[in-house]
Image (cartoon, rainbow, N blue to C red):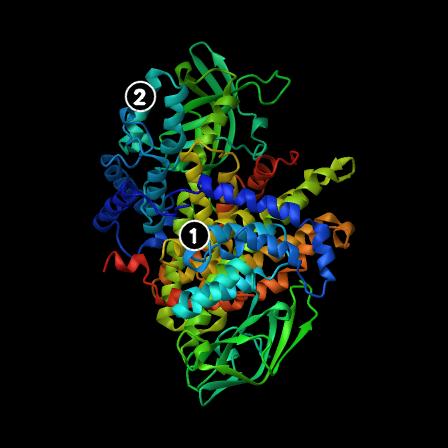
């Protein structure tokens, strides 16, 4: 058992941390709130140059061939600094499944563009029902000759406004089981019939409505097997859940630190408010939750990194992150008093992002149900030992 | 990062499971809450203690020369987990002796004391059963304010006062007692001493204090001119507070097996919902999942604390963090579990009837054991004080 990172991993963390602290102070975060693109192309270029978009991509496709740990550390630090960037949709939602399910030709064509050129991708799954399981995907893709024709709309697609390419999940066959008959398409964001509108959301992570009106997609642009797209979606959700949880864990840590610092400085009744048990005990509960989340994320990541991912642990990490991040923000703001509720304070910037992050890669109900499915399958030790 | 146990620990776990198969009856998990209540279950516990002693597991963290096996923190974690999961009784013989009396005597007891008391504990002997007399009616969390007086009279001390919430006093041969040997002190922490009191002493009365379910765990001890020989003083006279702190540090980690108890109880609950089909209900699924996530978290944090101990890193606030965390988990588990069992959760654990009880009655037991768990070894809020002060470096709040 080892609860520490290696020296190399600590070094990677240090350089990422320093990069974000320098390139993305909170003034920048506030400035980008009103930006039409929702990210800073100069900063993005620097991230690409440092190899961040190629962290998990093998060298033969232009990446730095890091471990899952590297991108996990990256997400933690990004979450700590709430960096507005199309990184998550591009790398986690798209590059990772392309690496896993793509044909050799697709990988050769696409991955170097992401790793070396920072091509932006977006992932379109969610529709009007807002359901995150397969039943939520109703958009149709019909085969006509050598092409598929996409019709329908996708919602809350992050950074679709600046994406060059899209991964779009659509239904190519009707089946009793909603997980069957799905197909994932690689769609040129500029293709004829694709219309994109930005939906105003609190996180300002450029959630878009994408409408597809008779959009033609060549057959070669299918990721994975036709009709078996759920395998791709599930892969995306499982991995994105852990990495999103890492991002949220980093954010929750930051909020805890901000609040503890304030509780030590702010005086009332001639004492720091952190000396009052009402405040102190809440901070302690926050600390416990934040540390717990941190290690739950590491545990899930450890299984992924060693090649035996655990669906139970992946879902636990995300379900926990969803609850903890909000609670830490809420209590942190309340403990600040009125000042905490103003736009001058950084803490609110974190809370504005919780809804987006909670929904991405699975909300709490969704993951709790997945956990329950794993529990249904498991055999308790008290039965097996005496069997 | 690596969350796996080593080969040595896994082998130890298998060995314990062989012991469980041989000696621990199945389907009696509910009894682990009643070890000290009934004569019958106490006798069984002591019979298992004897067997554990033969394996040197009863005192596994003790050095070999004192009858232990010199186990590492990780091995201790594995043992505590197996004890919690399988409900192995008798592991502590009332807890005090194995957990802190023995280790304290090794640290600051006389050679005579070590030779007289330690082998009895390590052997799982009925004369090796200890209770601990710290709390008094007016001294709970503020322990240093204790008033039980201990006055030197020739070769003896005379003790007068009252101890309370003394777990297992009705089963113990000796009491590890904190007393006031000097009342003319400026600071209440001075003038305290640790002494060994023979529970058969004249003038000592044990009165049962039943909990609100009617279970008999703890007691009051009344001391009226109780005489003990001066050689029963442990450590230095009036240096008791420092000795107490040393002894209390051995108490850390007593809660290690708690998450494994939770694991067993949650496994039982999940199994019940599978057998009854309840697991198909959305609300039941949500609740089970929430417990599963909380438990996985509590367990992982507890491992982190042990890993830190093993590696000589900070361990000041972590055991308190984990105790408070597990208190909350037990409470949630008892509530969710009871809700799932519905009307059957109101059964009286004192009059357990297999005709009615679901899952061996463990949730009825747990539901009312919870407050006790949250109080024992420092209440949840006392633990939060420690974490606030040492984990977050906030000003002392009490």
- Say yes or no: labels 1 and 2 on the same chain: no
Residue B45 location in percent, x, y?
30, 43
Q: Position of residue A100 (x, y in %)?
A: 41, 65
Disc 2 secondary structure class: helix
SS category of the residue bearing label 1: loop
Does B210 sit left or right of A355 as displayed? left
Q: Which label is found at residue A67?
A: 1
- Residue B338 at least partly seen: no
Q: Chain of mark 2?
A: B
> Going by the picture, which residue comes out furthest to the left?
B22
Q: Give the Cα distance between marks 1 and 2.
A: 58 Å
Residue B398 placement (x, y as % from top left): 65, 35
Subunit bearing disc 1: A
Question: Foreground: B380 or A198?
Answer: A198
From the viewer's side, name the closer residue of B42 and B236.
Answer: B236
Identify the residue at horizontal 47%, vertical 81% (top origin). A218
Above/below status of B25 relative to B74: below
Q: Is residue A143 above or below residue B135?
A: below
Q: Is residue B161 left or right of residue B57?
A: right
Instruction: Tell me where residue A196 appears, x and y as whole percent.
Output: 65, 76
The residue at the point 60 percent across, 50 percent down is A80
User: Looking at the rendered structure, which numbered label has been put on residue B116?
Assistant: 2
**Of labels 1 and 2, the one closer to you:** 1
One can see residue B69 in this view: yes
Among the 4 quarters of the image, the one containing residue A165:
bottom right
């Amino acid at each position: 058992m080892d609860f520490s990172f290696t020296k190399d991993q600590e070094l990677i963390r240090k350089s990422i941390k320093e990069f974000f602290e320098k390139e993305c102070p909170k003034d920048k975060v506030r400035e980008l709130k009103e930006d039409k693109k929702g990210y800073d192309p100069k900063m993005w270029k620097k991230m690409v140059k440092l190899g961040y978009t190629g962290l998990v991509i093998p060298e033969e496709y232009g990446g730095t061939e890091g471990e899952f740990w590297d991108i996990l550390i990256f997400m933690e630090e990004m979450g700590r600094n709430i960096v507005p960037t199309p990184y998550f949709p591009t790398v986690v939602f798209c590059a990772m499944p392309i690496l896993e399910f793509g044909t050799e030709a697709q990988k050769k064509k696409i991955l170097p563009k992401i790793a070396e050129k920072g091509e932006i991708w977006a992932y379109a799954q969610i529709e009007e029902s807002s359901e995150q399981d397969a039943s939520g995907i109703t958009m149709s893709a019909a085969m006509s000759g050598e092409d598929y024709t996409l019709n329908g709309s996708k919602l809350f697609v992050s950074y679709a406004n600046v994406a060059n390419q899209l991964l779009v999940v659509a239904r190519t066959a009707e089946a009793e089981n909603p997980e069957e008959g799905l197909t994932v398409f690689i769609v040129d964001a500029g293709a004829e019939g694709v219309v994109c509108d930005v939906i105003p959301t609190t996180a300002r992570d450029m959630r878009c409505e994408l409408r597809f009106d008779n959009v033609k997609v060549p057959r070669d642009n299918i990721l994975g097997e036709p009709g078996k797209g759920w395998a791709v979606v599930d892969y995306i959700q499982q991995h994105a859940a852990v990495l999103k949880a890492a991002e949220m864990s980093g954010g929750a840590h930051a909020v805890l630190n901000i609040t503890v610092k304030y509780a030590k400085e702010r005086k009332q009744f001639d004492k720091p408010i952190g000396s009052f048990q009402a405040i102190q005990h809440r901070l302690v509960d926050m600390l416990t939750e934040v540390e717990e989340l941190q290690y739950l994320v590491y545990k899930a990541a450890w299984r992924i990194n060693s090649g035996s991912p655990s669906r139970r642990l992946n879902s636990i990490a995300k379900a926990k992150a969803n609850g903890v991040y909000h609670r830490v923000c809420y209590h942190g703001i309340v403990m600040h008093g009125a000042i905490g509720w103003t736009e001058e304070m950084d803490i609110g910037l974190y809370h504005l992002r919780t809804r987006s992050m909670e929904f991405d890669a699975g909300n709490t109900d969704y993951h709790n149900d997945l956990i329950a499915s794993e529990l249904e399958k498991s055999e308790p030790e008290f039965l097996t030992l005496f069997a | 990062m690596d969350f796996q146990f080593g080969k040595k620990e896994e082998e130890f776990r298998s060995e314990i499971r062989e012991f469980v198969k041989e000696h621990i009856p199945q389907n009696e998990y509910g009894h682990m809450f009643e070890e000290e209540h009934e004569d019958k279950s106490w006798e069984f516990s002591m019979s298992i203690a004897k067997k554990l002693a033969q394996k040197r597991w009863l005192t596994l963290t003790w050095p070999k020369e004192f009858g232990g096996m010199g186990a590492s923190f990780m091995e201790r974690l594995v043992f505590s987990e197996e004890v919690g999961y399988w409900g192995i009784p008798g592991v502590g013989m009332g807890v005090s002796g194995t957990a802190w009396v023995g280790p304290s005597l090794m640290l600051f007891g006389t050679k005579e004391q070590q030779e007289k008391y330690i082998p009895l504990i390590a052997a799982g002997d009925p004369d090796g059963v200890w209770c601990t007399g710290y709390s008094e009616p007016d001294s709970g969390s503020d322990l240093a304010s204790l008033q039980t007086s201990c006055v030197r009279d020739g070769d003896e001390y005379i003790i007068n006062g009252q101890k309370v919430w003394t777990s297992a006093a009705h089963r113990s041969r000796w009491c590890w007692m904190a007393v006031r040997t000097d009342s003319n002190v400026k600071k209440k922490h001075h003038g305290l001493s640790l002494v060994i009191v023979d529970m058969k002493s004249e003038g000592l009365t044990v009165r049962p204090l039943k909990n609100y379910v009617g279970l008999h765990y703890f007691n009051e001890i009344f001391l009226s001119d109780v005489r003990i020989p001066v050689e029963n003083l442990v450590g230095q006279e009036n240096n008791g507070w420092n000795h107490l702190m040393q002894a209390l540090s051995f108490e850390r980690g007593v809660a290690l097996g708690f998450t494994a108890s939770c694991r067993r109880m949650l496994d039982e609950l999940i199994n019940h919902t599978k057998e009854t089909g309840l697991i198909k209900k959305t609300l039941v699924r949500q609740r089970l999942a929430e417990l599963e996530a909380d438990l996985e978290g509590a367990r992982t944090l507890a491992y982190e604390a042990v890993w830190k101990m093993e590696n000589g890193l900070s361990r000041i606030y972590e055991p308190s963090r984990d105790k408070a965390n597990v208190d909350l988990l037990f409470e949630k588990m008892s509530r969710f579990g009871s809700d799932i069992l519905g009307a059957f959760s109101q059964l009286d654990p004192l009059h357990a009837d297999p005709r009615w009880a679901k899952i061996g009655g463990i949730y009825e037991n747990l539901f009312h054991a919870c407050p006790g768990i949250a109080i024992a070894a420092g209440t949840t809020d006392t633990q939060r004080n420690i974490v606030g002060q040492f984990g977050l470096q906030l000003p002392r709040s009490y």
